[in-house]
Amino acid sequence: MSTENTNDAPKARKVRKVMRGTVTSNKMDKTLVVQVDRKVRHPLYEKFVSRRTKLYAHDENNEAKVGDIVDVTQTRPLSKLKSWRLLRIVQAAQA
């Protein structure tokens, strides 16, 4: 009989999604609205079509400004709409 306990091993976390987008609003306290633009191929016409998604992200220190390009990562639900958090500011907005 082995004395090893498999429950003591640290559990591996799943890889969390990271999305890159532009901050469109930072008027709420500790919350950003990030617009993610992407191109998808139309199933019938096979033409690339632009799609955009609006994500609500948590910004603990209110450091991102409108126009910044940011990376956000998935996290547990923080409120009704917020399930993302700010990972890093990739590029600051042009002043």
Image (tube, helix red, strand yellow):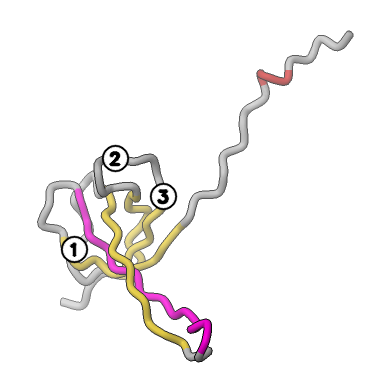
* Residue interval drawn in magenta: 31-44
Instruction: Kindly identify which residue carries mark 1.
Output: 65
In the image, what residue type sits under mark 3? Gln
Q: Residue lying furthest front in this view?
A: 44
- Between 50 and 88, the one lying in front of the other is 50
Label 1: how many Cα within 10 Å (few below 14, some 14–19, many 20+): some
Q: Is residue 95 left or right of residue 51?
A: left
Q: Are marks 2 and 3 in contact (CB under 8 Å)?
A: no
Instruction: Kindly identify which residue carries mark 3.
Output: 74
- Rendered residue at 10%/57% (across/down): 27
Instruction: Kindly identify which residue carries mark 2.
Output: 78
Label 3: how many Cα within 10 Å (few below 14, some 14–19, many 20+): some
Label 2: how many Cα within 10 Å (few below 14, some 14–19, many 20+): few
Where residue 75 appears, as percent x and y from the top left, is 40, 44
State the quadrant of the C terminus.
bottom left
Q: Is residue 74 left or right of residue 10?
A: left
SS label for mark 1: loop
- Rendered residue at 52%/82% (across/down): 43
Q: Magenta includes 34?
A: yes
Vertically, is 48 above or below 66? below
Q: Is residue 44 left or right of residue 54?
A: right
Q: Residue lying furthest left in this view?
A: 27
Per the model, the C-alpha gap separating discs 3 and 1 is: 20 Å
SS label for mark 3: strand
Where residue 94 appears, as percent x and y from the top left, is 21, 77
- Quadrant for residue 71, please give it: bottom left
Comes first in the chain, label 2 or label 1: 1
Vertically, is 51 above or below 33? below
